[in-house]
Amino acid sequence: MEAKIDINGMYKPSEDVVARDVQGEFIIIPITSGAGDLEDEIYSLNETGRAIWEKLDGKKTLKDAVRELVSDFEGDGAEIEKDVSGLLGELLKRKMIVKISKS
Amino acid sequence: MREEPYVSPWIIHKSDLLKKKKPILSRLDIELTERCNNNCAHCYINLPKDDREAARKELSTAQWKGILKEAAGLGCMSVRFTGGEPLLREDFEELYVFARKAGLMVLVFTNAALITPRLAGLFKRIPPLEKIEVTVYGMSKGAYEAATRTDGSFEAAWHGINLLLRNRIPFVVKGALLSFNEREMDEFEKWAAAIPWMHGRSPAYSMFFNLRGRRDGRKNELIKKLRPAPEEGLRIFARRKEDYVKGMKEFCSKFMRVSGDRLFSCGAGRGGCVDAYGFFQPCMLLRHPDTVYNLAGGSLEDALVNFFPKIRGMKAVNPEYLSRCARCFLKGLCEQCPAKSWMEHGTLDTPVEYFCGVAHAQARFFGLLKERENAWEVRDWEERLDSFVKSGQEARCGSKN
């Protein structure tokens, strides 16, 4: 099932994964079973993915994250929003990030 | 922004893990304790499980966490928890979870006897990401407990193994081949091949047992008695003659050479093993005091950058070694190394006759050596090797085959 991305929602890395920078490679390692696709896989994010990941602090909305990325990379807003949605869909599918519920 | 995919599955293959961009430390062995719940006569390390003095000297939970944290910071991807029996540590679960949360994959070496439903549940919830390795000492209670010399160890181990199976926790098995269990080899291999994560493969065996890592003369005499004679070991290797010769042709084509006077041609010191008391060894077996680094006064990084490279550069000085091992082309077949020399003789460069005998027995079997010929005296070894590797030459087996 396709994960629905809420552009006004706030997301953060799941506690079921840990992200590490090893020799410049940004990798995401599942901690608990169910994170990721298979139990013996770890994942890498490319530079784009890493830049987006680092904006997922659970404090800002995706809309704000996109705004910051547009500023950081001097990129096109619509294209970056599409990128962010694409990555979040992949991460949500693998339970690597969680949505912060509004209090 | 780039059009590359954002997330790509990165399937771990041990052989090429971080091959292109290897960190200063990619893998670390952690010997959590030398104590063991079994009392195997052939073991090079085990102390009694209730050895209070050994337990008192072991690193604390906080000290182990500090080491694991530094390892992860150095880029380490995988740690091996071994012993003794690592599950004897009361803080095993805590250290395991700490390592996993530090982003480390964990390989556990165990006899499985201390695996509880709670621990199996933990492995299921937080998978180690490396297959657990279980040593099995026999398929029957009699054979198993003749090896472990511990009442109830058979039932306990099989209880643990069944917990792993029931919870579908990936594990592989390996054996220690002893006179007590040799007749059970076929049964063991048949059972092992059916374990899902063995993928139909035969288990690995230890057979040419190492002497005590702490150089215990009395126990060493017993270990020597449990070792098969070289020809007997060869007979076991060659049980499936065709597969054995085929595999060894490939192996010999890659690893046979004259090693010269450099003592270290392995990976020792590129990673290493932290022993139960906080000494960082260049490998799991080498405990010669000149080659170990006390982490109490330093760090993994200092050892890897400043200490181990000096060790790796050491050269043999023993004339006997220089006239034999340094000139011998059976490098790939022989287990001779500084660690084995230390365990057998208390030096780094003394030939170990037993391993020399095992290597020579194999070389004769492959037709690389004539009867009574010493490998270090052979000048045309490259031609002989080439002939063995390329031809369909039938290997000759000893009289017992």
Image: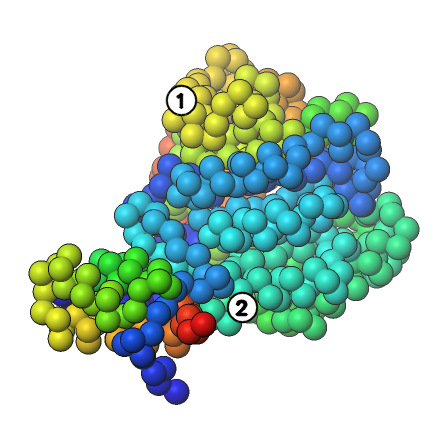
Give the residue type at disc 1: Asn
Which chain letter goes with mark 2?
Answer: A
Q: Quadrant of residue B347?
A: top right
Please state the horizontal and vertical placement of residue A26, each as a whole percent of the image. Answer: 32, 54
Residue B42: name its quadrant.
Answer: top right
Q: What residue sits right under mark 1 in the picture?
A: B306
Mark closer to the observer (1, 2)? 2
Q: Residue at x 44, y 48 (%)?
A: B77
Chain at tag 1:
B
Left or right: B122, with B138 as reference point? left
Residue B10, compared with residue B30, is above or below; it is below
> Which quadrant of the figure contains the N terminus of chain B?
bottom left
Indicate the secondary structure of the residue bearing disc 1. Answer: helix
Could you say which is closer to the camera, residue B55 or residue B239?
B55
Residue A24 makes an appearance in the image: yes
Label 2 CA crowd tier, 10 Å (few <14, some 14–19, many 20+): some
Q: Residues within 10 Å of mark 1 (few under 14, many from 20)?
A: few
Query: Label 2, on which residue?
Result: A33
Mark 2, secondary structure of its residue: loop
Relative to B41, say whether B313 is above or below: above
Q: Is residue B6 left or right of residue B214?
A: left
- Residue at the extreme right of the image, as rendered: B151
**Residue A27 falls in which quadrant of the image?**
bottom left
Q: Is residue B341 above or below residue B229?
A: above
Question: Looking at this view, is B108 or B346 the one in front?
Answer: B108
> Residue B104 appears at what percent x and percent y?
49, 51
Q: Is residue A95 left or right of residue B341?
A: left
Say left or right for B385 vs B39.
left
